[in-house]
């Protein structure tokens, strides 16, 4: 069985753990530095929540460097919403960069106040009709050519993959649809 560590400092981590367990993997919480060693993890999920808070906690708990290194070494990682912001190399309406491992520029809270939260169905890769829940979501304003676009809404990129990293603006863990997590677990299974 594969073990997926879900960053559990803040935000929607419990739902991600339930989702990976439903798909037959083991989901464990990452709350401190000693939860991170690579030998017991096959993949990592960075959940939604508040990227500024999570970024700060990563430093305060001294998890930041180890996490960044694991990702750079090729550990499969999925970032949803705030998790996507954590992975982005730049944020076009914020001077902060967090892990900065993925060649995307994101825009935080990109849908304005009145559209703060909404839910639609759309294509994700070659899957049709995937439910997408957006909550004060970012979108990808720019992506390098090494980044594969997986989903677009209103001409903005809302899901993408680059090597071992996959990100979504929306919250796949808040629906009962397992497609996005299956996509990520396929990436995990492909690593030997
Ligand atoms: N607005 C949040 C941020 O900027 C992300 C929202 C979410 O993860 N649902 O970090």
Image: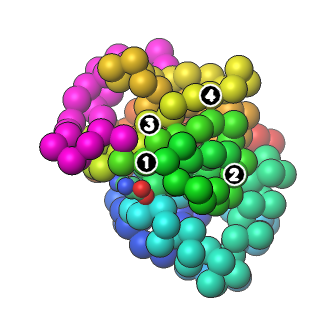
Image height of 176 relative to 52, above or below: above
- In the image, the residue with mark 3 has its CB under 8 Å from the nearest atom of ligand 1: no
The residue carrying mark 3 is 139
The kind of secondary structure element at disc 2 is loop
| Residue 145 sits in quarter | top right
Q: Quadrant of the C terminus?
A: top right
Q: Position of residue 60 (x, y in %)?
A: 62, 84
Q: Look at the image and give the residue range highlighted in magenta.
A: 110-132
The kind of secondary structure element at disc 1 is loop
Q: Position of residue 92 (x, y in %)?
A: 54, 43
Q: Earlier in the sequence, mark 4 or mark 2?
A: 2
Give the label, 2 or 1, closer to the camera.
1
Q: Residue at x 41, y 43 (%)?
A: 138
Q: Earlier in the sequence, mark 1 or mark 4?
A: 1
Q: Residues within 10 Å of mark 2 (few under 14, many from 20)?
A: some
Q: Residue at x 77, y 69 (%)?
A: 66
Magenta stretch holds residue 112: yes
The residue carrying mark 1 is 108
Q: Main secondary structure of the magenta part?
A: strand
Q: Which mark is residue 100?
A: 2
Q: How is the image coloured?
A: rainbow
- In the image, the residue with mark 1 has its CB under 8 Å from the nearest atom of ligand 1: yes
Image height of 58 relative to 125, above or below: below
Classify residue 72 as left or right of residue 43. right
Q: Earlier in the sequence, mark 1 or mark 3?
A: 1
Q: CA distance from mark 4 to mark 3?
A: 11 Å
Q: Count of labels shown?
A: 4
Q: Residues within 10 Å of mark 1 (few under 14, many from 20)?
A: many
Q: CA distance from mark 4 to mark 2?
A: 13 Å
Q: Position of residue 132 (x, y in %)?
A: 30, 35
């Amino acid at each position: 069985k594969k073990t997926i560590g879900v960053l559990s400092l803040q935000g929607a981590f419990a739902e991600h753990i339930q989702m990976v367990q439903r798909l037959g993997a083991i989901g464990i919480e990452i709350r401190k530095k000693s939860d991170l060693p690579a030998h017991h993890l096959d993949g990592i999920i960075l959940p939604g929540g508040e990227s500024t808070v999570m970024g700060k906690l990563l430093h305060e708990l001294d998890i930041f460097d180890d996490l960044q290194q694991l990702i750079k070494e090729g550990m499969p990682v999925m970032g949803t919403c705030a998790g996507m912001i954590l992975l982005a190399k730049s944020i076009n309406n914020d001077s902060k960069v967090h892990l900065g491992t993925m060649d995307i520029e994101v825009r935080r809270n990109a849908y304005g106040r009145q559209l703060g939260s909404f839910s639609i169905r759309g294509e994700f890769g070659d899957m049709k009709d995937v439910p997408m829940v957006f909550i004060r979501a970012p979108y990808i304003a720019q992506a390098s050519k090494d980044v594969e676009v997986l989903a677009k809404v209103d001409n903005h990129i809302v899901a993408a993959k680059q090597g071992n990293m996959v990100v979504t603006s929306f919250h796949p863990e808040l629906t009962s649809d397992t497609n996005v997590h299956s996509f990520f677990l396929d990436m995990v299974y492909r690593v030997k």
